[in-house]
Image (cartoon, rainbow, N blue to C red):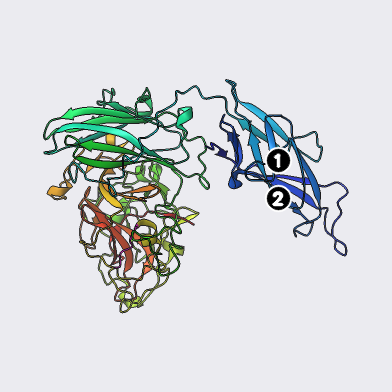
Amino acid sequence: MKRILSVLIPVAIALTGCKGEPGGNFPDSEIKISTVLDKLSSKAQVTILSRSIRVDCIKGSGNPDFITEWTLTSGEEWLTLSFDESGLGASTSISGVGSKNVYIVVQANTNTIDRSADIFLNGSTEPALVIVQSAKSLLPELPPPGSGIMSDVPYFGELPTPNHSYVGAFWRADQIGERVIRTAVGANAGEWSAEVAWYSELWDIEEGDGVVLATGDSADPGIRGADPGDAEEYKVTGTESRITGTVQADEYIVFRIGLTAPFAEFNTETNPARYAVVLLTYADGTKKQKIFLRQGEGADYVMRPGDKDGGGADVGDTDNRTYAVKFSPFNITASDDEWAAATPGGPDMTDYPQLAVRGGVFTEYPSQGGAIFQGEGKTDPEKRRAYNHQANVLPSGMQTTNGMFNDEGTRLWNAATNETCPEGWRRPNDGSSVILNPGTDGANGSVSVKGSEMRQSLHLNPLTTNDVSSPVVNSVYGYLADGFFDRRATETTANGDDNAKFGSVGLSDIHAGFRGRLFFNPTSYNSLFLPCNGYRNATQTVALIGLRAYYWTGTAFGSTNTPMGCFFVGDSQQGLPYSQSRSMSFSVRCVKE
């Protein structure tokens, strides 16, 4: 299994005596060598195409050079080079003509320290590349998941309690600390077990790189208190991949999930995250639930381009998810300095931060709700105001009527003056980046799936309606253990309803966390969590905190007030496509441009 930390290492070497093109005043040709490969695991392997060395021969004019000859040489016998993806004919020296891919073939490193090999171009004494191979892992080998143990568990399975179950866990690439699972069982008393059921290919359990489990609560004396400790200070030790216990009715199944190693091959472009699944079996073995694990904070797909729907058909007519995009795992908010200079909960809109265009920052944890924004402010002082769950009064100064844009007629959403996503990011679209016709496309969700980034990305079977009874089978509502939410006591907001109870943590702080809806790919188990941090209707304070949320898109609808497209998520709202007035305040989840 490949374990490569992806770091771009560009090298450009001008070829002595290789002149420019006839008839032009161009500089000499050059060879450019690049690779995303920086560090290999200790295992014997052949690098895959995307991790190979790329040799590009370029004329002084910038055109490809098809006749330049070159030679790459490895300075170590344990690292050889090949033109074949299987490693066939690998040698310490390899010669080619023009641009080519070169595969790296390495032997296992049995040493207890890292080792490196220099790669030289055309006999140079200075290395063009330096490839490092990790020392033999000192972590104990982890047991592999049992074969077929999830074969009888469709989608996410069955939750012990519909609103108070943990459905996923999240770590950044450099985090391995405990994630505390504390799930209410209701009437589902009896024996239970949890076991690691599945890994993506980016884990290496033979070298001890994987998921470990432990029964019982955290040793942190501040767990679920006012000042919990950092999860990284409380790690799960050992090699257990299956644990068991017994629980009484109306009590909690409590256990911890930990990782043994950081995500060494993490790269925001090529390896943005890796995934695993823990299977929870309960009620004396009669019921099962999947808990979706993710390590890595890079933007990633849920449903990927080319993924079929649940019936095996193409998605989006014939384009087959061409419009699927990579989502950030975090909501958008204002910076800590901007919040510190503001007065959240104040009576006027100027009590809240006004962001610069593309001035948003990402929350630290996926469960944190961040800020909510009007779809579009009417005047410059209203644009890009960052409100949040603490807006217990309707701020004065902001226009909140549904028809506040009626005097301007049908209009697009203007990203140039309203986008809050940082540079390199944007709001996703739902069907189009332009105005949709509600007469043919549908004002409340019946837009054609073709062209919808939101639906092609998040739905296994993309919806063409916003009927709450329409299931999104690849989503599940509950808690996320991300080192923030799971370390704090759940709270209930005053402006929620009974179903909103115990759906929030840290409500007195701008960094509050919330229960939410997790979307997952039922084949690759890629996952994405959207917190339900509430929303503000045009003339109301923030409502249904910890229960529901809307997420803006960049798509406008050509009807009265030209409402904006959005996605509705919550306890019974499984990612429903909607359109709402721009006067309302919703969350923003950015996609990679």
Give percent across and percent down for residue 175.
42, 33
> Which sits in the foreground, 18 or 436?
18
Q: Which quarter of the figure has residue 426? A: bottom left
Write the start and end of the magenta stretch as one range.
459-464
> Up-down: is 133 above or below 365?
above
Which residue does the numbered mark 2 point to in the structure image? 100
Asked whether residue 44 appears in the rendered view, the answer is yes
Asked whether residue 488 appears in the rendered view, the answer is no
> Which sits in the foreground, 120 or 177?
120
Looking at the rendered structure, the kind of residue marked 2 is: Lys
**Which residue sits at x=30%, y=55%?**
349
> Up-down: is 578 above or below 262?
below
Give percent across and percent down for residue 180.
28, 32
**Which residue sits at x=56%, y=37%?**
4
Of the numbered discs in the image, which one, if any, rests on residue 89? 1
Q: Residues within 10 Å of mark 1 (few under 14, many from 20)?
A: few
Give percent across and percent down for residue 219.
28, 22
**Which residue sits at x=32%, y=44%?**
368
> Which sits in the foreground, 261 or 188?
188
Q: Which quarter of the figure has residue 189? A: top left
Secondary structure at numbered mark 1: loop
